[in-house]
């Protein structure tokens, strides 16, 4: 595994003079590379296939096998065919245009191939595999340290994003509590450790940390947010540390974030490092702003933090790359005023025990990152980070020009030379967080959360050149966020297109907000319309049509009336929709509008259509009542006549005589005249039918004798 240039790796040209290079099957990994490339290409061809008849494009019903998995011997082609079917059947958006697999470039293919090679290396002898893994990890660590300007760090490669932090914390517990290996959680009885985390940071991080290490949640010490609303309050952290030292606790770990989601706020790293150094606390940093030294290309290095978490797979846009945790081995503990009850005898032994835990795991975990760096090259990957910051600055300029409220700091990458690299990391933001909000408010009203959600959904649907994420924050409500380090970059040539799309949607938002109050005032002027609050609706508002006399009508009838009204309105304008108010009853919802919308015209349309639906509904109701009443009267008359006619016939013996003397007449019926709403007997209809039948039979009977005079047929 020599230091082959990236150009040689990417090249497909064979050298005729070298037999091993001309025949891929004779190279150790040539056949494996060919097979993996074929598998990836075949899966991509299946999910990205656009040719074929319309009948072939129709999605098949998903039938997942529920039987016991008892595999039989199959060929690789059959297995690939099964995988292709599973890729399609398990896709929740099978009818969408976007394929479930992302397109792969040379770097991504190298990362995929490296996982196969790593599995192949498991067949090596253990000592050989350890030496090979150490060589690859050393080269990768040296390159990563130089790229991100880190000095005096060891590296741990892992797949789970928080595994490195868990192992670093376990290392600290071994170091600060020499009896931790033997006593476990009982070692904390006399002196509880403290883990400091900002209240704005995700709670799941400290919860996962305590769960994995069997630490009580009482170890977590939440640090308030700075009064400016951005980042951790360093002064409050120092006060908490003083309280813990006085309360016989061990300040253990500070979780700092720089450019972390969702708003990209930073932390004064230099001040944070000074506090941690003074109280002998381990400082762990994570966040997108750690990519800034690689994006700027400055040669200045730093080592303020005791450990850092880097996510190159997310930053480079290459799936399958490991997460890297850089860490320092803690120094032996010396007794001082902050650690009077901590034994110093096992300090070095604890650090070595923790180091053994960090160096464990997969022996070739760094191989995918090593291969991707070789294929892409360090400069190409650094340019990707630089382009991400430039893309964030371009998006921020568009958003600022549109008049939206910016909540994140200005993206870094172009700091002046006199700014220290640590200060630049503290202030930089790798994302753009913004929202549509009224001026002069700290947190917008709840209605603006609906507007921002609508704006985010429209931008996700209409502007595919940029990835917009809809986030909900406690301090600012619903916020929109663009982070190029977590997805595709906004290309320079498509900035204008995105700007025009954003501007068009903002016109709709401003028009809807401006017409919302006039809409409420106009609704009050119509006695047949009731203003309805529709939860979660960002449109102009909702009304319920309640005509005079219907105030005490059953809910079912009002719901039916308004649903029919919506069906009638949608024939004219699709902006109307049916919704449910806070009381759970149906109403007419008005969608987003433009500046030239006439509210009076819309409400007049609703009232006019409501009257038509009401008249039709009233006529139908009256007809129903007439039918119901006529059926009841007819049934009562028939029952009365049947009882009167059959009174004597029900008496024993007498009934037989009566039936013999006067056979029962044919049953009589009733007919309902809808125009008058009255009942009439059907005797005249029976007589008319009988007369018509007799009239039809008499001519036939008159012609039948004439057939006797017909000449006989000749034999």
Image: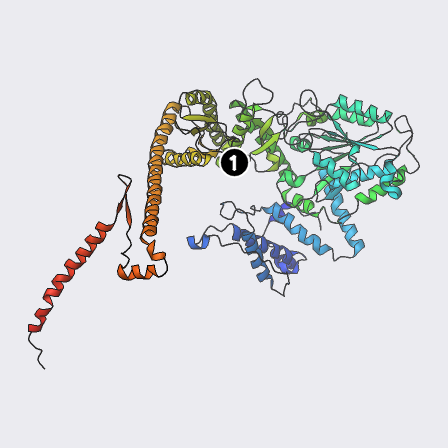
Q: Position of residue 382 (x, y in %)?
A: 64, 36
Q: Position of residue 697 (x, y in %)?
A: 15, 62
Residue furthest front as drawn: 654
Please name whichever residue, 126 or 661, is drawn nearer the observer in this view of the structure. 661
Q: Quadrant of residue 661?
A: bottom left
Residue furthest right as drawn: 345
Q: Please say if 321 is above or below 532.
A: below
Q: Position of residue 536 (x, y in %)?
A: 53, 31
Label 1 sits on a secondary structure element that is: helix
In the image: residue 247, left or right of residue 505:
right
Q: Quadrant of the C terminus?
A: bottom left
Q: Position of residue 115 (x, y in %)?
A: 67, 51
Q: What residue does disc 1 label? A: 460
Q: Quadrant of residue 370?
A: top right
Please name whichever residue, 496 or 502, is drawn nearer the observer in this view of the structure. 502
Which residue is found at the position 60% from the left and 20% from the top? Answer: 442
Q: Is residue 383 visible?
A: no
In the image: residue 51, left or right of residue 173:
left
Q: Is residue 388 visible?
A: yes
């Amino acid at each position: 595994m020599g230091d082959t240039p990236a150009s040689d790796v990417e090249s497909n040209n064979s050298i005729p003079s070298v037999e091993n290079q001309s025949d891929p099957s004779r190279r150790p990994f040539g056949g494996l590379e060919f097979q993996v490339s074929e598998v990836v290409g075949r899966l991509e061809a299946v999910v990205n296939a656009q040719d074929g008849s319309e009948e072939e494009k129709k999605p098949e019903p998903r039938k997942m096998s529920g039987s016991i998995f008892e595999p039989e011997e199959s060929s690789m082609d059959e297995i690939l065919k099964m995988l292709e079917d599973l890729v399609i059947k398990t896709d929740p958006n099978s009818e969408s245009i976007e394929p479930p697999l992302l397109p792969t470039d040379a770097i991504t293919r190298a990362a995929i191939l490296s996982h196969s090679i790593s599995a192949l290396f498991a067949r090596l002898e253990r000592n050989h595999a350890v030496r090979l893994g150490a060589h690859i990890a050393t080269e990768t660590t040296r390159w990563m340290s130089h790229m991100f300007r880190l000095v005096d760090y060891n590296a741990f490669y892992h797949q789970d994003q928080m595994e490195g932090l868990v192992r670093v914390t376990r290392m600290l517990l071994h170091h600060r509590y020499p009896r931790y290996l033997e006593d476990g959680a009982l070692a904390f009885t006399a002196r509880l450790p403290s883990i400091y985390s900002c209240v704005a940071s995700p709670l799941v991080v400290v919860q996962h940390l305590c769960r994995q290490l069997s630490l009580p949640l009482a170890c977590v010490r939440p640090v308030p947010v700075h009064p400016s609303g951005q980042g951790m309050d360093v002064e409050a952290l120092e006060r908490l540390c003083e309280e813990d030292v006085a309360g016989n606790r061990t300040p253990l770990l500070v979780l700092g974030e720089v450019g972390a989601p969702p708003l990209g706020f930073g932390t004064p790293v230099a001040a944070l490092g000074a506090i941690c150094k003074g109280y002998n606390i381990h400082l762990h940093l994570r966040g997108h702003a750690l990519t800034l030294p690689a994006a700027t290309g400055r040669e200045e290095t730093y080592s303020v933090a005791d450990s850092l978490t880097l996510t190159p797979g997310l930053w480079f846009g290459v799936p399958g790359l490991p997460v890297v945790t850089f860490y320092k081995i803690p120094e032996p503990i010396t007794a001082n005023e902050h650690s009077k009850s901590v034994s110093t005898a096992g300090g070095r032994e604890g650090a070595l025990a923790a180091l053994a835990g960090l160096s464990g795991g997969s022996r070739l975990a760094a191989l995918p990152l090593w291969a991707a760096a070789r294929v892409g090259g360090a400069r190409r990957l650094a340019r990707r980070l630089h382009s991400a910051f430039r893309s964030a600055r371009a998006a921020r300029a568009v958003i600022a020009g549109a008049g939206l409220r910016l909540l994140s700091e200005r993206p870094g990458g172009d700091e002046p030379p006199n700014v220290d690299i640590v200060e630049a990391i503290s202030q930089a933001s790798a994302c753009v967080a913004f929202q549509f909000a009224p001026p002069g408010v700290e947190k917008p009203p709840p209605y603006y959360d609906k507007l921002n959600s609508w704006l985010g959904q429209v931008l996700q649907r209409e502007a595919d050149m940029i990835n917009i994420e809809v986030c909900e924050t406690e301090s600012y409500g619903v916020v929109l966020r663009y982070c190029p380090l977590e997805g595709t970059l906004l290309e320079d040539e498509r900035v204008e297109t995105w700007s025009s799309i954003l501007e068009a949607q903002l016109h709709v938002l401003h028009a809807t907000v401006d017409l919302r109050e006039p809409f409420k005032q106009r609704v009050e002027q119509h006695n047949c319309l009731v203003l309805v609050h529709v939860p979660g609706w960002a449109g102009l508002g909702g009304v319920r049509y309640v005509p005079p006399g219907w105030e005490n009508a059953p809910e079912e009838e009002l719901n039916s009336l308004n649903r029919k009204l919506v069906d009638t309105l949608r024939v004219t304008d699709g902006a109307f929709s049916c919704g449910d108010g806070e009381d759970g009853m149906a109403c007419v919802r008005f969608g987003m509008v433009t500046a030239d919308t006439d509210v009076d015209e819309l409400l007049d349309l609703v009232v006019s259509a409501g009257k038509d639906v009401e008249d039709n509904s009233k006529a139908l109701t009256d007809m129903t009542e007439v039918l119901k009443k006529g059926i009841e009267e007819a049934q009562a008359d028939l029952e009365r006549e049947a009882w009167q006619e059959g009174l004597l016939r029900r008496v024993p013996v007498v009934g037989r005589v009566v039936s013999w003397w006067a056979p029962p007449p044919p049953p009589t019926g009733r007919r309902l005249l809808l125009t008058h709403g009255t009942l009439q007997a059907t005797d005249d209809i029976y007589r008319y039918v009988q007369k018509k039948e007799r009239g039809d039979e008499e001519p036939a009977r008159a012609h039948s004798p004439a057939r006797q005079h017909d000449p006989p047929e000749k034999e």
